[in-house]
Image (cartoon, grey):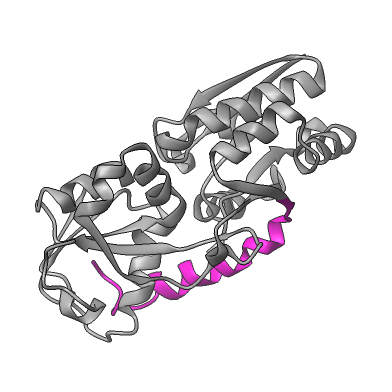
Amino acid sequence: MSFHAISYLAPNWLEFYQAVTLYLGRVLGCQADLMVGECDPLKDSRLYEDAIDLAFICGLPFVRYGRIRPRQFSAIAAPVMQAERYQNTPIYFSDIIVHAESSFQTFSDLANSTVCYNDPGSNSGYYLLRDRLLQEQRPQFFKHAIQSGSHQRSIRWVIERKADCAAIDSTVLEREFRVFPELAHHVKIIESSRACPMPPIVVATHLGDPVIEKIQSALLHPDSELSAAMTAMQIQRFAAVTTEDYAAIADLYDDVTNSCFSQL
């Protein structure tokens, strides 16, 4: 038996996803490999060919793919971060960042500024930002919107003043500050989004219920090696989740795409 996992999430978490994949290989007693998604999950032929056993994926492409291919994947677990803001639940936020020396103090101050975003399929970097624009009730809020390609690049573009602001997954931002602490001195957060379900670990239903249950149990009860990797990432634990827990993201996506007040 071989076990194929893929990550579509931020590269500064990739080392941890590799640790999870190797751990599951040990649990299942098989060779486990982790691939890096290099395109939009909704355009990845490997998913449509049902060639992936497990994916680390943003909640938004997960629910959107589920509308195309229902019941191919099931959400089984998501990380719970240690910091108090996460309330011991599998949630995250989208943090609106600006340069530390900028005059921006509130979201409304960003009117007619330049925003950058990681990817138009991202919940944290794109759709939660568009959701926030619904409160402004203006058909054109930002002067310019430019795609950076990654959260890490968006952070640096704000620091380099190539863009005035960006919406960054809070767990990615915190990880980047731990790896590059000097960055934190050049960035300030002026607002955070509503809490959103943490990107899930999803498994292919072709594995069958016994294997899926074994994988979920292994994540909920990690060994010492995985526990050490979790501590390094400031993860408190894995929580059991279900596909239905991500319905709120689908609702947000529908609200945003149907509104004329949410365009970047």
Q: Is residue 21 magenta?
A: no
Tell me: 179 left or right of 223.
left
The residue furthest right is: 210
Q: Quadrant of residue 24?
A: top right
Judging depth in this view, the residue of 136 and 153 nearest the camera is 153
Q: Residue at x 53, y 66 (%)?
A: 85
Asked if one can make out residue 225 in the rendered structure from this viewpoint, the answer is yes
Relative to 46, does residue 161 appear above or below in the rendering?
A: below
Relative to 217, does residue 63 appear above or below in the rendering?
A: below
Looking at the picture, how far across and down is residue 202, in whole percent?
66, 42
Looking at the picture, how far across and down is residue 102, in whole percent?
11, 66
Q: Residue at x 33, y 53 (%)?
A: 120
Judging depth in this view, the residue of 218 and 186 nearest the camera is 186
Q: Residue at x 39, y 42 (%)?
A: 178
Instruction: Say which quadrant the N terminus sits in.
Output: top right
Asked if one can make out residue 148 in the rendered structure from this viewpoint, the answer is no
Looking at the picture, how far across and down is residue 26, in whole percent?
76, 19
Give the residues drawn in magenta, as a range. 239-264
